[in-house]
């Protein structure tokens, strides 16, 4: 029996992935200062094209939270966990990104971290139908991946063709007339 994506969502991520391209379909033109925006210290999904990332299931966890005084149980989020490994070589462009440059201090080591699928939600709910149509090649569930050390996080949406999309809100001339929109970072699976 095939595992259900909601009972074992980590299965959708397992394998070796490569950052394939950036997607600007929500924009009438690419943002002029895109590199500066992707270089923001909190922009962890701004991976560079060609970078390889490996995900593997590692179990489940409960993140620290507050204690409910009535039930005496932790109210921190719980979810499935996976090991993430960002593989060498790191590009010079990747090593200048403020969110990630700390991992480039030892150029001979891959970066390892433990992520938890903190939540998943329907990204299409309450969205403009034109926006949903624009991203019609995506499945409706968006996952929030959080480092167990709480040092970084990013969101992921699985595409209908099996690729992964990391959505990033950036400033730029959006097709809907606004001054900002959602760009995507596409990851393709290169091995299981």
Image (cartoon, grey):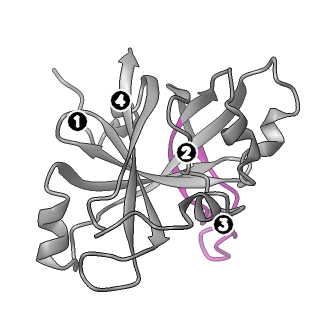
3 and 4 marks in contact (CB < 8 Å): no
3 and 2 marks in contact (CB < 8 Å): no
Which residue corresponds to mark 4?
Answer: 188
Q: Is residue 26 above or below residue 7?
A: below
- Counting other residues with Cα less than 10 Å from the Cα at mark 3, is it few (<14), some (14-19), or many (20 or more)? few
Side of 139 relative to 167 (left or right): left
- Which residue is rendered at x = 50% and y = 36% of the image? 49
1 and 4 marks in contact (CB < 8 Å): no
Q: Secondary structure at mark 1?
A: loop
Q: Compare residues 25 and 106 and report the one nearer the observer.
A: 25
Side of 84 relative to 9 (left or right): right
| Mark 1 or 4, closer to the camera | 4
Mark toward the start of the polypeptide (2 vs 4): 2
- Which residue is rendered at x = 24% and y = 43% of the image? 159
Q: Cα distance, mark 3 to mark 4? A: 43 Å
| Mark 2 or 4, closer to the camera | 4
Quarter holding the C terminus is: top left
Q: Which residues make up the magenta segment?
A: 61-81
- Residue 24 position, x and y percent, is 33, 58
Q: Is residue 185 above or below residue 35?
A: above
Side of 169 relative to 26 (left or right): right
Please check the rendered image and state whether residue 79 is part of the magenta-colored stretch, yes or no: yes
Q: Indicate which disc residue 72 carries.
A: 3
| Mark 1 or 3, closer to the camera | 1
Q: Cα distance, mark 2 to mark 4? A: 21 Å
Please check the rendered image and state whether residue 128 is part of the magenta-colored stretch, yes or no: no
Which residue corresponds to mark 1?
Answer: 4
């Amino acid at each position: 029996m095939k595992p259900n994506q909601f009972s074992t969502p980590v299965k959708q991520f397992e394998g070796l992935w490569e950052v394939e391209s950036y997607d600007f379909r929500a924009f009438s033109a690419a943002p002029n200062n895109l590199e500066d925006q992707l270089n923001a210290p909190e922009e962890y999904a701004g991976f560079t094209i060609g970078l390889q990332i490996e995900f593997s299931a590692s179990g489940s966890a409960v993140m620290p939270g507050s204690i409910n005084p009535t039930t005496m149980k932790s109210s921190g989020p719980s979810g499935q966990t996976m090991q993430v490994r960002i593989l060498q070589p790191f590009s010079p462009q990747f090593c200048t990104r403020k969110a990630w440059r700390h991992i480039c201090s030892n150029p001979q080591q891959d970066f390892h971290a433990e992520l938890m699928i903190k939540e998943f939600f329907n990204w299409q709910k309450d969205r403009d139908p034109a926006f949903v149509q624009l991203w019609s090649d995506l499945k409706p569930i968006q996952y929030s991946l959080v480092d167990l050390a709480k040092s970084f996080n990013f969101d992921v949406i699985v595409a209908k063709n099996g690729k992964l999309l990391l959505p990033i809100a950036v400033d730029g001339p959006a097709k809907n007339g606004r001054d900002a929109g959602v760009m995507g970072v596409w990851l393709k699976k290169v091995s299981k």
